[in-house]
Amino acid sequence: MTYQQTKQWIVDGNVDNYPNDTQIQEVAEYIKNNQVVAFPTETVYGLGGNARSDQAIDKIFQAKGRPSDNPLIVHISSKSQLAEYVENITDNAKQLIEAFWPGPLTIVLPHNGKLSPKVTAGLSTVAVRMPDHPVALAIIEAAGLPIAAPSANRSGRPSPTTAAHVTQDLDGKIAGVVDGGATGVGVESTVVDCTTEKVMILRPGGITKEALEQVVGEVLQDPALTEEEEAPKSPGMKYTHYAPSAPLILVDGDINFLRKNVLASKQEGKRVGTLLTQEHQGLSEADKEVIIGSKEYLPEVARALYEALRGFEANEVDIIYSEVFPETDLGSAIMNRLRKAAGGKILQQK
Ligand code: TXA
Ligand code: MG
């Protein structure tokens, strides 16, 4: 489906006005009419559609070019709404919801069949979250529907953290975009399986393993996150993701090692890009450096990551080298995304 024009709403910054905001009301009408609209959440922009409508869900998959076996996250605006769509809420899930909702935590539970089967790609479980963003919550509330929303990028591209990123990928392919400014967290929600006795992380994200463990004790990780030969339990984790406009290689070593690799590629006549922390700005000898925050403050790196991955125009460079980050706290999510963006390519300093 193509649109002559993808409508743009620039929403009022005053949260108190949302219940009567004519723009929010209009966006809600689009959702109720099974149109798909991109809107901000605290993590990344989502491409939202009525989670009870096959027709709306088809439009989401089509606009993104997303494989239909990759299920979507359902967004709700109150904790009590969860009970309408799941079979039962496990004790673990209850504790995590109390601690982290609204927020960047997605909970997988058995569903009760009331959503479009296309949302769950035919699985017996559904992934649900309550976003911590006033615009997202106002739209869900005004529509009075659960809203399925994957990240609002073309499949395979870096996720969008601004309305401009959404437009780059989906202009003319979706009915509209709600511009609510840049998102805060910058990487997607953590997805946890709560159907088993011990909670298992299927996708690292905005809520860290360390924070989850403070609430429910030991938390497992899907072995596929670290072992390449394992099949992931979260279907979306098996696809290429977040790819920048040139091949990306991670460099696990000091700045001198990174510079050596840059110079070697330049010797081969390649134009080289680097993704660098601000501590190393100007030190890589690359043709173009894109800065991704400070090594000392991972939330800033998470926020800057996708914009940085979109920071090289098509044909601007032939190869991109990136620094790596410690895999604790938010570093797990950052490294998970970087590894995928690099297709697993990593150089290790001896
Ligand atoms: O922060 C976020 O989670 C963003 C914003 C828009 O809310 N959404 C997002 O959606 O990242 P998406 O579709 O790009 O990623 C959803 C992930 C995929 O890896 C998918 O396979 C997994 O959640 N997922 C969805 N339903 C699942 C289920 N029933 N069981 C296991 N994994 C599931
Ligand atoms: Mg995505």
Image (cartoon, helix red, strand yellow):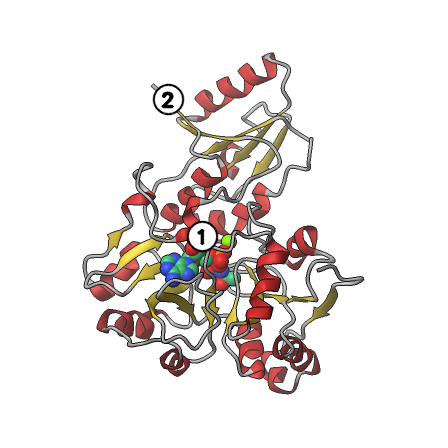
Residue on which disc 2 sits: 349
Q: Residue furthest bottom?
A: 20
From the viewer's side, name the closer residue of 234 and 179: 234
Residue 206 visible in the shown view: no
Residue 38 visible in the shown view: yes
**Which label lies toward us, 1 or 2?**
2
Which quadrant does the C terminus fall into?
top left
Q: Residue furthest top?
A: 267
Q: Of helix, strand and loop, which one carries label 2? A: loop
How packed mark 1 is, by other alpha carbons closer than 10 Å (few <14, some 14-19, many 20 or more), is many
Residue, x 44% and y 29% (percent of image)? 345
Q: Amino acid at mark 1?
A: Pro
Q: Estimate the x, y position of residue 292 in percent, counting from the top left.
A: 53, 42
Rendered view: 347 above or below 90 = above
Residue on which disc 1 sits: 299
Q: Amino acid at mark 2?
A: Gln
Q: Estimate the x, y position of residue 75 in percent, counting from the top left.
A: 48, 71
Q: Quadrant of residue 247?
A: top right
Q: Could you give the CA–CA distance between mark 1 and mark 2, rounded to whole angstroms?
A: 26 Å
Along the polypeptide, which appears first: circle 1 or circle 2? 1
Q: Quadrant of residue 100?
A: bottom left
Q: Estimate the x, y position of residue 245 in percent, counting from the top left.
A: 62, 36
Q: Could you tell whether 120 is left or right of 266 in the image?
A: left
